[in-house]
Image (spheres, helix red, strand yellow):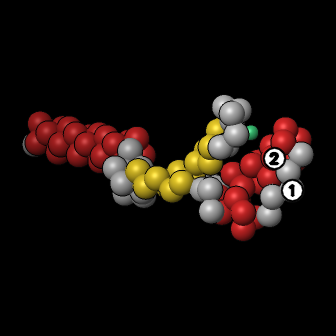
Amino acid sequence: MKKSILAAVAAFAVVSALSLFAVAEDAKKPADKPATVYTVQCDSPCSFMVSGHDKKEVIAVVIEHAKTHHNMNLTEKDVEGMVKTTEASK
Ligand SMILES: [Zn+2]
């Protein structure tokens, strides 16, 4: 009688270990969410390039770069046309 209780406890322990493993696997790969990357490369001979997941942030960085390095006042719309969108669908 005592033996079968131990067996049941052991089986439960295995099941919880497996579900913990499954949770860890899910956390490891957020593969279900396609990560969109926005990239802008400066057309000038300068090698400036910025990329990120936040389009607004990328645009802000480009506007700042244009102002400080090229003395250009770009608007969000100007930069929007330069943004390359890459969907990492994996
Ligand atoms: Zn530049």
Q: Residue 65 location in percent, x, y?
A: 80, 43
Q: Is residue 73 left or right of residue 25?
A: right
**Which residue, as the protein is rendered here, is positioned at the far front?**
45
The disc labelled 2 sits on which kind of residue?
Answer: Ala
Q: Nearer the viewer, residue 53 or 82?
A: 82
Query: Disc 1 on helix, strand or loop?
Result: loop
Q: Nearer the viewer, residue 7 or 20?
A: 20
Query: Disc 2 on helix, strand or loop?
Result: helix
Kindly indicate the quadrant of the structure image that contains residue 69: top right
According to the picture, the residue beneath numbered tag 1 turns out to be 73
The disc labelled 1 sits on which kind of residue?
Answer: Asn
Pointer 2 with pointer 1, Cβ within 8 A: yes
Query: Is residue 50 visible to us here?
Result: no
* Mark 1 Cα-neighbour bin, 10 Å: few <14, some 14–19, many ≥20: few
Query: Is residue 13 visible to us here?
Result: yes
Q: Is mark 2 within 8 Å of ligand 1?
A: yes
Task: Name which residue lies at 68% across and 33% down.
Answer: 45
According to the picture, the residue beneath numbered tag 2 turns out to be 66
